[in-house]
Amino acid sequence: MKTFLDGVALEIDDASLAGVLEVGAAEAERNGRVIIEASIDGHRIDEDQLVEPSSDPIQGEQVHLISADPRALVATTLFDARDALSDAKQLQDSAAASIQAGEVTEALQPLAEAIGTWQIVRDVIDKSALLLGFDLNDVKLPTGKSIADAAGELVVLLGELRNAMASEDWASVADVLAYELDGQVAKWQEILGLMGSQIRG
């Protein structure tokens, strides 16, 4: 089996995915990069397998690993999350309008999609800090609060939304969407843009 990192052949002793990724990640790190994608015989390996790679021998002829500059990768991911919040706002507004019109069933799909986007934003923040090795408590916003503080407030707000949904308190759901969560969009677009710009340099 042949293994390549960004087109350059690697010497691999352990022919398992775990072994290949260990060697590839070490080589990428020496170049200040991280592995972002892997494929076996042209078939992309899903993220779950990259996070918990198998120790079984790889069934394939060639493994290709692709790396990236972690700072550029994080900045791009942050900007993508910022842009996604524009769609989340439209979904929230649509869901709130449907609920206020008494059309709860029509609100469920956009509501679920909006919550999913907010969860992605939360994951992006955490993974960015983990990848680049910084503490969210140390990153201060213009308001003086840390990103960790802002993230904690968002988690509480999303928890209130989920609780209102679970109790079918649709009036409260509409209020959270139309007022409290709506105000978070511009706030988090600013935070994500600020982080992305600082990281990209």
Image (spheres, grey):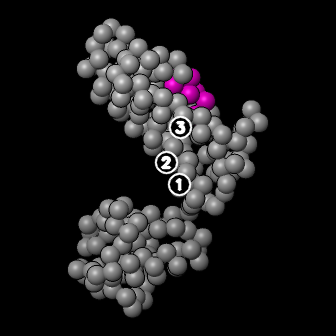
Q: Position of residue 89 (x, y in %)?
A: 46, 25
Left or right: where 30 falls relative to 167: right
Residue at 28% x, 73% y is: 40
Quarter occupied by the N terminus: bottom left
Task: Give the mark count.
Answer: 3
Residue 8 shown left or right of residue 42 in the figure: right
- Separation (CA) of disc 3 from disc 2: 11 Å
Q: Image quarter for residue 110?
A: top left
Give residue 84's position: percent from left, percent from top.
Answer: 45, 36
Above or below residue 134? Residue 67 is below
Left or right position of 141 against 129: right
Specify the label residue 8 is tagged with: none
Residue at which label 2 appears: 123
Alpha-carbon distance for marks 3 and 1? 16 Å
Bounds of the magenta segment:
181-188
Q: Secondary structure at mark 2?
A: helix
| Residue 91 position (above or below residue 140) | above
Give the residue displayed 45% in from the left and 41% down from the top.
119
Mark 1, residue position? 127
Q: Earlier in the sequence, mark 3 or mark 1?
A: 1
- Kindly identify the amino acid type of the residue bearing the numbered disc 2: Asp
Residues marked 2 and 1 touching at CB (< 8 Å): yes
Q: Residue at x 33, y 8 (%)?
A: 101
Residue at (38%, 78%) from the top-left corner? 18
Q: Earlier in the sequence, mark 3 or mark 2?
A: 2
SS under mark 3: helix
